[in-house]
Amino acid sequence: MSQSYGNYQPEIYLNGLADQTPPFTTDPTRLAEAARERLADGPYWYVAGAAGSGATERANRAAFDRRRLVPRMLTGATERSLATTVLGEELAAPVLLAPVGVQGILHEDGELATARAAAGVGVPMVLSTASSHTIEDVAQANGAGQRWYQLYWPNDDDVTVSILDRARRAGFTTLVVTLDTWTLAWRPRDLDQSYLPFIRGVGCAIPFSDPAFRAGLAKPPEEDVLSAVLKWVPTFTGTDKTWDRLPFLRRHWEGPIVLKGIQHVGDARRAAAAGMDGIVVSNHGGRQVDGAVASLDALEPIAAAVGERLDVLFDSGVRTGADVLKALALGAKAVLYGRPYAYGLALGGEDGVRHVLRSLLADLDLTLGLSGHSSVAEVGPGSLSLE
Ligand SMILES: Cc1cc2nc3c(=O)[nH]c(=O)nc-3n(C[C@H](O)[C@H](O)[C@H](O)COP(=O)(O)O)c2cc1C
Ligand SMILES: O=C(O)C(=O)c1ccccc1
């Protein structure tokens, strides 16, 4: 699809988005502020918070700030395309919506709103296993849109197989297996408020609607939520997993498989050796290991080591079009967009997600062109070099 997202620009001026309710902003760095005014402390800090002191969350941003694009002139980049191919799938832009769990705490429509907005804009969504809505309902809301499924890999193989089968039947193409969150990290904001959304069953729609999971319960979740949650939560993130278990996923998933949460070159090589199709270089937005390397700093050596063998995706700290270009320049094929769209969801449901996503794509399109590039394929190490 060739579409100039920069065309959204006059619309932004004409509509005076600042006057609209809810209070949208086109400045991604101010979205958190706007959402802060809307949300109760629990949900707000669940999204905005990080692990420990927040050192890695800050490092993610600092790593973007240290790098600078070097624009080129008179290249004829007035006609542009953001289109790209990732894991054999055509994408309208090198952007996907990152898996974000428990969206029901941000807006009553939760993942359904996100699914509609993503399909409308033409960007794939990655649905979290910790969704507030079922796989089937999200697929329906997403319609003809592109959707990937993020697996928190349960300890129970029957449940895993059942969930994978549901995702396949519901039209999810790529499987994203998150490795960095086999338990939640030390997150002071949540701990201080005793805030853990799924403790009341929020974010458990997928297991609660799953026949294999329900078969193992003494009473259905509708009758005894707490027991169901206490059975699910300690095991759904895959506390029993090691590298030798990956062939199991290959046997039960026909499409591409991507490992999310890779930060070490050795692990990236291991993913390639295990026959994985892709990785997401990510530190989970600084929500897991406080003091972990900035995700953008990990990207360059990882992409250099394995970029020829598998598709390297990236997340953690992407906020602007320039950030997307920097990640592409350092070897990413596409990025996952996280917290900003969650704030958009909190501020305006489907409209909020659409606004945030279209703003990012418009910014990306304009910044790509003004940097002298007509397509994302042209973005590379040279985009950051003075010579
Ligand atoms: C509120 C919230 C919930 C998240 N839930 C999940 C999840 O269920 N599964 C997952 O793989 N990643 C999850 N993530 C991590 C994101 O997919 C992504 O790695 C991260 O948000 C990137 O950092 P950024 O938001 O600072 O750009 C979550 C992130 C946030 C902020
Ligand atoms: O909060 C998170 O970062 C996350 O990944 C998660 C984990 C379990 C349930 C919901 C979200």
Image (tube, rainbow, N blue to C red):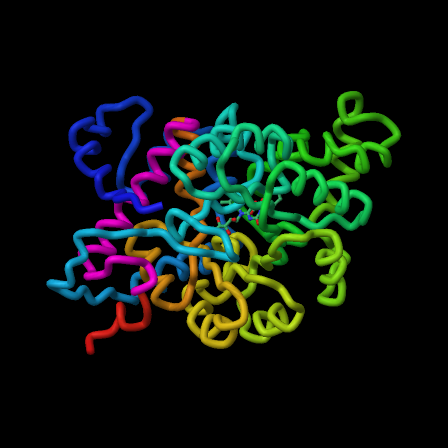
Q: Quadrant of the N terminus?
A: top left
- Residue 319 percent location from the top left of the image: 35, 50
Residue in view at x 24 percent, y 74 percent: 385
Q: Is residue 352 magenta?
A: yes
Is residue 165 toward the left or the right of residue 311 in the image? Answer: right
Q: In the displayed structure, would residue 56 be above or below residue 267? A: above
From what the image shows, is residue 205 above or below residue 126? Answer: above
Percent from the top left, x then y, of residue 357?
A: 36, 40
Q: Magenta part of the protein: which range?
A: 349-378
Q: Residue at x 39, y 53 (%)?
A: 94
User: From the image, which quarter does the C terminus lie in?
Assistant: bottom left
Q: Is residue 179 visible?
A: yes
How many marks are shown on the rendered structure? 0
Query: Residue 340 appears at what percent x and percent y?
Result: 39, 42
Q: Quadrant of residue 278?
A: bottom right
Residue 259 is left or right of residue 386, and the answer is right
The one nearer the camera, 309 or 20, is: 309
Toward the viewer: 25 or 306?
306
Q: Does residue 29 appear in the picture of this structure?
A: no
x 75%, y 46%: residue: 160
| Residue 211 within the segment the image draws in magenta | no
